[in-house]
Image (spheres, rainbow, N blue to C red):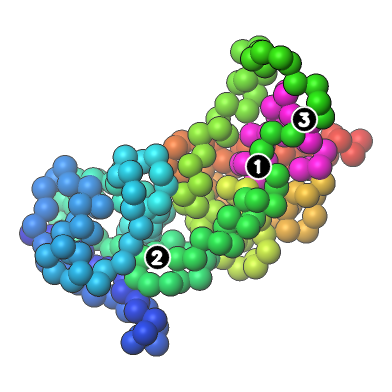
Amino acid sequence: MITVKLQRFNPEIDDAPHMESYRIPALPTDRILNLLHYIKWYIDGSLAFRRSCAHGICGSDAMRINGRNRLGCKVLVKDLITDKVNEMTIEPIKGLPLHKDLIVDMEPFFDAFRSVMPYMVTHGNEPSREWVQSIEDRERFDDTTKCIMCACCTTSCPVYWSADNYVGPAAIVAAHRFIFDSRDQAADERLEILSDAEGVWRCRTTFNCTDACPRGIQVTQAIQEVKRALMFRRI
């Protein structure tokens, strides 16, 4: 048996979030998502949390596990529980409005994502067949194509917690993916968007975002590459 300390909040009856503890059975190979399912199915059906694919692809089950942003489907009990530590804490990700329990309002996150034009822009020069890139051109932005928009990076950023309009790491990663794509023709527009006071210059290089990314994206490096692109564009 292990103890799961879970942040609960029901806006219909609670004035503020509070912690509740649950003693439940668990195997070392159980995922945190399995524990939440157990609590919901066998103890309290009102528990609210997001999940979908359960395989680390959809990004919907981002949460704070022992204070660190992670996907509930990717963390195992054995990663947290030892002979000396028999409990864990699960909370919603920070920096976004709380709806209920582990569910936050993702709209501010997606608004920032949409603001950087996260799509291919061309001006009528598309080839009639596949658009061939060199290996080097593809490698330039390959890392940032891995983003699953889970918000782990953005909501681990201390600047994002306190700056209402900062676009956040995930939006910059999305912009990076197209800024450095040799086929795209809107790099200047994206750089202009990210050059204002709420863009890349808000980053303080704490590397929280890189640590939090479940896909292993070098988020901080991508942000610095966008900064360099801005600087050299202006020289």
- Which residue is rendered at x = 40% and y = 51% of the image? 60
* Magenta stretch prevailing secondary structure: helix
Secondary structure type for disc 1: loop
Secondary structure type for disc 3: loop
Which numbered disc, 3 or 1, marks the residue closer to the eye?
3
| Mark nearer the N terminus (1 vs 2) | 2
The spot of residue 35 in percent (x, y) is: 19, 56
| Mark nearer the N terminus (2 vs 3) | 2
Q: Which residues are magenta?
A: 172-191
Q: Amino acid under label 3?
A: Thr
The spot of residue 127 in percent (x, y) is: 73, 16
Q: Residues within 10 Å of mark 2 (few under 14, many from 20)?
A: many
Q: On the rendered structure, is 106 left or right of 68?
A: right
Q: Amino acid under label 2?
A: Ile
Residue, disc 2: 103
Q: Amino acid under label 1?
A: Pro
Secondary structure type for disc 2: strand
Residue, disc 3: 122
Which numbered disc, 2 or 3, marks the residue closer to the eye?
3
Q: Is residue 97 magenta?
A: no
| Residue 75 visible (yes or no) | yes
The spot of residue 213 in percent (x, y) is: 46, 43
The spot of residue 92 in percent (x, y) is: 39, 64
**Disc 2 to disc 3, how far (Cα)?**
37 Å
Above or below, 203 relative to 106: above
**Disc 1 to disc 2, how far (Cα)?**
25 Å
Above or below, 177 relative to 41: above
Q: Residues within 10 Å of mark 3 (few under 14, many from 20)?
A: few
